[in-house]
Amino acid sequence: MSAVVPEVSERKQAFAKRLAIAIVAIALVGLPLLFSQLTIYRLGVVLIFVVAAIGLHILVNWAGELSLCHAGMVGVPAFVVAGLSERFDVSPLLLVPAGLVVGAGVGAIVALPALRAKGLQVALVTFAVGIAINSYFFNQSWLVGPASGRQAAVPSLGRLTFNTSKSLYPVVGGLFVLIVLATWGLYRSRVARAMLWVKADPEAAAVFGIQVRFYRILAYVLAGAFAGLSGSLTVVWTRVVSAQSFPTTLSFTYLLVVVIAGTGFVGGVIVIGGLLEGGALFISSAATWINYMGPIGLVLSLTANKNGINGAMRQVLSRFEPSEPVALDCVLDEMSPDAESDLDSDLRRRRRNSRWSTLAGRRG
Amino acid sequence: MSTVVVNGLFVGIVYGLLGVGLVVVYRGSRVINFAYGETGMIGAFVFAELRGGLLANRQLGSADHGLLVPLLAAVAVGAAVGAGTELAVVRPLRNASRLQVMVGTLAVDSLLLVIAVQRWGSGVQFTNPLIGGKGVRIAGLSIEPQQLLIAGCAAVTLLGLWALYRFTSFGLRLRASAVDPFAAGLVGVNINLTSMATWALAGALATVSAILIAPLGAFTTSFMISYMVRGLAAALVGGLTSIWGAFAAGILLGVGEGVVTFKSPITGVTDLAIAALILILMVVRPSGLVRTAY
């Protein structure tokens, strides 16, 4: 197909989009510095929670896989980073890449049995792994240290030492922005498209030459890598991690966030993760109600709003976009993963409707 | 060692009952109910509160208001939670993938946990032994009254379930709707009612299992999470369809766990072994070791 040359207005739109992203990124990193240490600390906790949730989002909403051991995937790299930092007195910031690699490794290990299993069995396998990590590995002193937890060294970069949340926030906030931008790049890449295709119809994807097994493993590895990043950043941010920091139920909370978020980019994950984790931290009086909101929201998301918060946000945004007639081949050429997922859900709805009408006919 | 095996046997009976409850739900709805453990936990706490009272600091009291009324009330609550799960999650998602329904049950699980922590806190609670008195000696081994109660409850439950599925018209309707809900609906079976009855039955079973196992360990609002994985392992050995297979696997699991814990003092080694069992089973024989027709 011929390449579409962007018009001046399109280029302006793209520039405006990039400018808006840059402003949001600078605001996210800079504005919180005006607040108190405690507020900044809580905001950091929320950002780190969202990073882990993004990993599970890729696994669940892009690749159609499932993990009930995500808390373990966050915890293991966190303990490795904290242990290395404690033992060799190294800044945990320098060990973030190591946490990423360990997380990716844990993801790969979880992927192997999950590859053999299908559907409900994957859930069982990952649930069993989660329980094993929590009950066995998080009780071993060689990994988690004493009961009070592992104490990492003070985060530093060269001569810069970050003793307070305020001094450390630009680093963690900046890393968060980089992670979101990297996820955006991934979302616009062939990898995300292939994963979405594998999720929608693995057999059709295989027919068109997509290595289904490879992308399934890759999804687990990516989820593990994000979990590893989150675990390492937890060590950087809190400096102390104990076995109680990563309970089994935390995996359910991550799943809850990503299911309510729905298929799409990470906007829904940031909104729901921020609401649930941030709400509980910032409004302590409303913490109980927020805890109720999560599961209820998940049930509503499954039964009433199947496209999740991302779908709802897409609907709202589409109202502001100009509707111009375009050639069909251009649409297919430029189709984003969002559009692909909408198309997929539309096709499924049509198929279901036709099945219902067939059944109704049979009954009639 | 023989005492370890006997103790493991009775703990295993409860694991077997947990597995049976999961099988009942799977046979009826093709869903693994992740809220099963917490449904039982809610029932067990209702039982403990009605029996011992609730003190001002959210601690359960040590009074004894009898067994029967609290037991019946707790079983009713467990059945209601099961029926509520069916109504709120399973029925609206009848045409969705089974994985989605399972995620829905995880939401119910989280909700029940939040409710329980709100009412009873997250600390360890006091529980009265279910029954007192002297035990009996069989072949030189001492059997505690609590263990006799477990065996009695398990026998009544299993025989009751077997009779329900085998001899009653309601059991026939349950089996028919499990095999093919559409065809069962065509011949007049009320699918909604049978589905709800299945989930209520499982809720009642979960409550009985949780009440029986609560005095054996630390009684907290999260006490059923690790038992749930044992019940799940037992149900998987039974291919998620065989009641007797799941029960037998539960007993073996309990005995095995007792022996492993006795031999190895490492914390969590049994959980690791059970996870390994599930992994091996899923990789080598995903359909379970024992399967049964409906």
Image (cartoon, coloured by chain):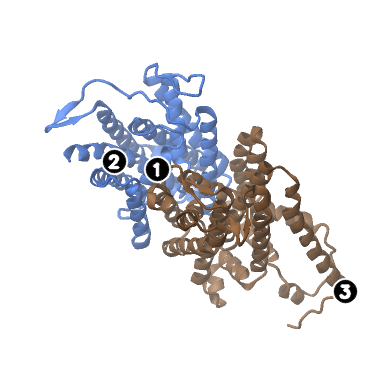
Find disc 1 in the rendering and name its residue: B226
Tell me residue B279's x, y (percent): 37, 57
- Which amino acid type corresponds to the residue marked 1 in the rendered image? Ser
Which SS class for mark 2? helix
Q: Residue furthest left?
A: B139
Nearer-N-terminus badge (2/1): 2
- Determine whether B8 is above or below A81 in the image: above
Find disc 2 in the rendering and name its residue: B12
Chain A rendered in what hue?
brown
Q: Chain of mark 2?
A: B
Residues indicated by labels 3 and 1 sit on the same polypeptide chain:
no
Q: Residue furthest right?
A: A8
Q: Is residue B183 left or right of residue B92?
A: left
Which SS class for mark 3? helix
- Which amino acid type corresponds to the residue marked 2 in the rendered image? Gly
Q: Are marks 2 and 3 in contact (CB under 8 Å)?
A: no
Give the numbered dot on residue B196: none
Q: Chain of mark 3?
A: A
The blue chain is B
Residue B179 visible, this angle: no
- In front here: A296 or A357? A296
Tell me residue A30's x, y (percent): 75, 53
| Residue located at (88% from left, 74% from top) | A8
